[in-house]
Amino acid sequence: MSAPARTFGGLPRRIWMLLALTLVTVAADFMVVPYFAVYFSRGLDLGVGFAAAALTAFTLVSKAAQVVGGWLTDRLAPERLLAAGFTAMILGYLVLAAGRSAPAAVAGMLLLGSGDGCLVIAMRYKLISGCEAALRPRVFSLTSVCFNLGAMAGPLAGVLLFSLSPAWTFACAAAVYAASYLVLRLFTEPRHQAAAPPGPRGPA
């Protein structure tokens, strides 16, 4: 098998694409995460207690999904976990965009927690799978850099979007995740193997 093509920094092009997707999706999350408490307590008038409970539920579900996601990744193709994670994130943001009630907020946060937990595990698996052991420390450090850059850029975009419309902000986050999954499938999935040559024919 030929070695993957190298690009800038000696890393495969697929790794750089995954790192870029990490930055973009983290930025989409942080467009809304810092403002959830204000949105739930004041925007929806559900109170500070509800906001605290919703954020706690999001965190707990995310951690539980990471445990389950790790178990599933060992048994299923990571692409299935990625598909589940992106689907949950998109649905979660769309539920929050469409609904302005406590049930919609709870459903949206549970979906986001589930999707976040699945993606954390699956994306890390994709980053290190097929990457030489000598390159993994660099990949881990770049993953941290991309996460922190997204965490800084997201709130700056969110403060503007949220002031205009929380619903549109959630819809924008869903659109970012949908576009990111499309890019992931088109540019980072392993290409199908060439069709095997036909076997020997039987007697005519």
Image (spheres, rainbow, N blue to C red):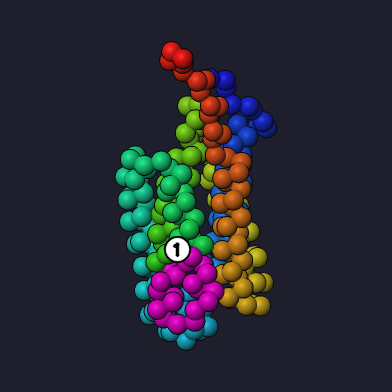
Percent across and percent down for residue 83 are 47, 51
Q: Residues within 10 Å of mark 1 (few under 14, many from 20)?
A: many
Residue 151 in sight: no
- At numbered mark 1, what does the secondary structure look like: helix, strand or loop? helix
Describe residue 194's horizontal placement relative to residue 107 as left or right.
right
Vertical placement of residue 67 versus 38, above or below: above
The residue drawn where x is 36% and y is 42% is 76
The residue drawn where x is 37% and y is 68% is 56
Identity, as a three-letter code, of the amino acid under mark 1:
Leu
Vertical placement of residue 204 versus 100, above or below: above
> Which one is nearer the viewer's eye here, 142 or 197?
197
The residue drawn where x is 41% and y is 62% is 113
Percent across and percent down for residue 21 are 59, 48
Percent across and percent down for residue 99 are 49, 79
Corner quadrant of residue 2: top right
> Which one is nearer the viewer's eye here, 31 or 192?
192
Magenta-drawn segment: 91-109
The residue drawn where x is 62% and y is 73% is 168
Residue 40 in sight: yes
For label 1, the residue is: 112
